[in-house]
Amino acid sequence: YPKLMELIAQFRKRHPELVSHVAPTDGSFVGHRDRRLLSILNREKLERVLGYLLDENEFLGPHGIRSLSRVHLEHPFSFQVGDQEFRVSYLPGDSDSGMFGGNSNWRGPVWVPVNVLIIRALVQFYLYYGDTFKVECPTGSGRLMNLFEVAKEISERLTRIFLKDAKGRRPVFGGADKFQTETHWRDNLLFYEYFHGDNGAGLGASHQTGWTGCVAKLIELFGM
């Protein structure tokens, strides 16, 4: 503990230009249960980031955090290089371009490893802030949650990809009726590479247990 305090003091002394923009920003940086935090996101920045992240019109989808804001469906980012225009738009499913590995698409779909990293970060922030930090989830709903509850909410949305809905259909299987209804297929889950940003259907390779299998750890963590 004394060594930790010494290192924090040295960092604050050597990098005053950074300390004013990160957490902690002043002397009162002792958190829940006497914990310390060093983060590029101070409280103000974290609130702003979560405002966008938890907005259902932006990043928060019904089945997890999208890799690109849905805002770009109507407002794609574009720039001109010479006579050629390049556009980045929200695509909820497979890519419409052969660039970056064929149909692989980071422009809107849900990726489990990205979600797990976000959930992990939220839990770490909760360990510091405790119940003193609450945000609207979803943004604009008026429903306040602490950061652990936000992490659980994202996890529940992610795990719903694999669970049967009110009609007995699993989002992961999308419109594939064979997988949805036939006895030999309907309960044999596949671990797809990524998932449709709006309806949760599995896309890409179907055997990505290395990262999509992380959903099992989320179920274990939150006891769902």
Image: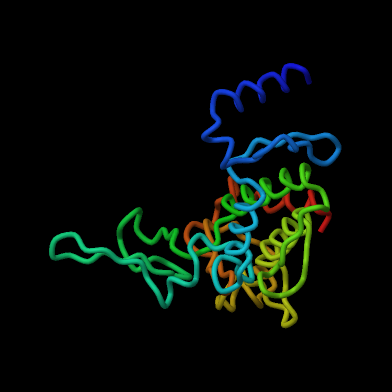
Give the vertical position of 25 relative to 55 (above or below): above
Q: Position of residue 188 (x, y in %)?
A: 67, 62
**Is the C terminus in the top left, top right, bottom left or bottom right quadrant?**
bottom right
Q: Nearer the viewer, residue 7 or 102?
A: 7
Colour scheme in the image?
A: rainbow
Q: What is the quadrant of residue 96 in the picture?
A: bottom left
Q: Residue at x 67, y 51 (%)?
A: 119
Question: Residue 207: x, y in percent?
Answer: 55, 53
For the N terminus, give its image quadrant: top right
Query: Farthest residue toward the left?
Result: 83
The image quarter in which residue 182 lies = bottom right
Q: 9 left or right of 86?
A: right
Q: Is residue 167 left or right of residue 178?
A: right
Quick check: 4 above or below 177?
above
The total number of labels drawn is 0
- Furthest toward the right, the residue is 33
Eyeballing the image, is 162 above or below 35? Answer: below
Q: Residue at x 72, y 82 (%)?
A: 167
Q: Nearer the viewer, residue 73 or 100?
A: 73
Residue drawn where x is 51% and y is 64% of the image: 109
- The image position of residue 39, as x and y in percent, is 62, 39
